[in-house]
Image (cartoon, helix red, strand yellow):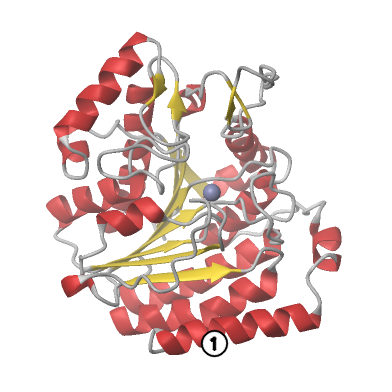
Amino acid sequence: MSKTACFTDERTFWHTGGTHALFFPVGGWVQPPSASGYAESPESKRRLLALVQTSGLAASLDLRSAPAATEEDLLRIHPRDYLARFKALSDENGGDLGDLAPFGKGSYEIAALSAGLALGAVDTVLSGQAANAFSLSRPPGHHCLRDKPMGFCLFANIPVAIEAARAKHRVGRVAVIDWDVHHGNGTQSIYYDDPNTLTISLHQENCFPPGYSGADERGAGRGEGANVNIPLLPGGGHDAYLYAFERIVLPALERFRPELIVVASGLDASAVDPLARMLLHSESYRAMTQLVRDAAERHCKGRLAIVHEGGYSEAYVPFCGHAIIETLADVRTKVADPMLDLAIAQQPSARFAAFQRQLIDEMAAAAGY
Ligand SMILES: [Zn+2]
């Protein structure tokens, strides 16, 4: 039985957002940040990897790096002009070419490596070299548009990986499930008229992009129906996500019958994330991972790659990510989530949950599920 492959590379932790505190540009009343004051810091990722190693989970994984995405890989998604502008500014001293996507010197190469790790995860699954795969890297990708970076995302890692897989493995229908707390607007925009790529985003309503909900955006042209947005109320927790899976995500996969499932796995819907207001905990991520694993078994011979996206609580991201990787690898270590009891006690009331379920039912009906 082949193992779960876990792709990671210390070099991707060396990407810097430059002089930002949380995501505020330094200057005026904004004091320069402490060492890890920039929200999209390497520490949450590095600490997840450290937990995987100290818990013994690493022994059950095939831990490896991958080559950076090539220019050919990147050009399948991004225009040459964007690559040139990004490379030139990265070679100088960094800057920001988009909307909240600052980068420092050398981030072009690091972003290409981050995309390469996602590409490696998808490729190894399709080649049958691993039971499934996880990619732990940064910068993330799901906000990046074809020609503009956005929200800490510099290349569209998952689309780059999917299109490389299509070029090499002739895979057809791919489903992307995005449980990052922010809307997967980049992936949506890249595949909006593509009937062969189902994009599903569960996100906190009106969070990022600011004021965005998206429930009515279902794709265009031949891609009509292949884009599904599930905006959830701030304060929603375990029940909201699991009910959305039951009523919308799983039926959408059933109808679409994917040949590969890729998850954009942000861990910023956790109960203590500084950039959002949702209430998930490690058992929520464990449960969602089990559901996508089962769906992958059912539809596509288990072909599943999970790609890390956001997640800004340095202390808590590792426990949520560890639960995901344990579930992929079918291993349960002795790691206990120190936040679990508190997070369970803080779940919203039954009345809130019932109202959120009603809204999910309405979304399901509107989308025909
Ligand atoms: Zn996010």
Q: Position of residue 205 (x, y in %)?
A: 56, 63
- Helix, strand or loop under label 1: helix
Q: Nearer the viewer, residue 252 or 297?
A: 252
The structure residue drawn at horizontal position 39% and vertical position 54%, both measured from the top left corner, is: 185
Q: In the image, what residue type sits under mark 1?
A: Asp
Q: Nearer the viewer, residue 29 or 39?
A: 29
Residue bearing the label numbered 1? 361
**Side of 105 where 288 appears, left or right:** right
Q: Is residue 176 above or below residue 368?
A: above
Residue 2 in sight from this viewpoint: no
Q: Residue furthest front?
A: 28
Q: Is residue 141 above or below residue 181?
A: above
**Side of 110 where 345 appears, left or right:** right
Q: Position of residue 366 (x, y in %)?
A: 42, 86
Q: Quadrant of residue 148?
A: top left
Q: Position of residue 288 (x, y in %)?
A: 56, 68
**Side of 357 where 121 appears, left or right:** left
Q: Quadrant of residue 98?
A: top left
Q: Residues within 10 Å of mark 1 (few under 14, many from 20)?
A: some
